[in-house]
Image (tube, rainbow, N blue to C red):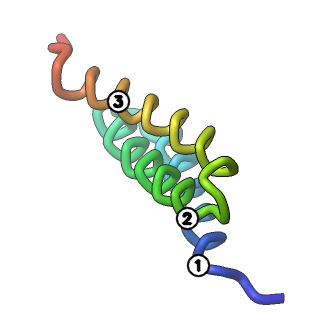
Amino acid sequence: MEITVVEIVGYLASIVVLCSFTMKDVKKLRMVNMVGCLLFVIYGFMMPTIRVGLPIIITNAAIMGINMYYSFVVKQS
């Protein structure tokens, strides 16, 4: 059984997102989570067909946008 590059990217994305939820500092959580979301977007584009990857791309791009908004636009006290 051979693991593919697509699977490696998917597993890496999952691990990074999972690790982000262990962060106590919200700013670090958002940054690490953005990296995980970006990896998931890449993973979505690597799927065999765009129809398979589109839900992954849309969801993670939206989550990444929310993280960016709260990290760079909203002033935290």
Q: Can you say which quadrant of the picture contains the C terminus?
A: top left
CA separation in Å, label 2 and label 3: 21 Å
Quickly name the residue at label 1: 5
Q: Could you tell me residue 46's position as x and y percent?
A: 55, 64
CA separation in Å, label 1 and label 3: 26 Å
* Residue farthest to the bottom, as pictured: 1
Q: Earlier in the sequence, mark 1 or mark 2?
A: 1
Name which residue type carries label 2. Met
- Secondary element under disc 1, as helix, strand or loop, is helix
Name which residue type carries label 1. Val
Task: Locate residue 61: give its quadrant.
Answer: top left
Quickly name the residue at label 3: 65
Q: Do the CB atoms of the residues marked 1 and 2 lie less than 8 Å apart?
A: yes
Q: Residue at x 66, y 80 (%)?
A: 4
- Secondary element under disc 3, as helix, strand or loop, is helix
Q: Can you say which quadrant of the picture contains the N terminus?
A: bottom right
Task: Locate residue 3: give its quadrant.
Answer: bottom right
Name which residue type carries label 3. Gly
Position of 32 relative to 30 (above/below): below
Instruction: Return the mark for residue 46.
Output: 2
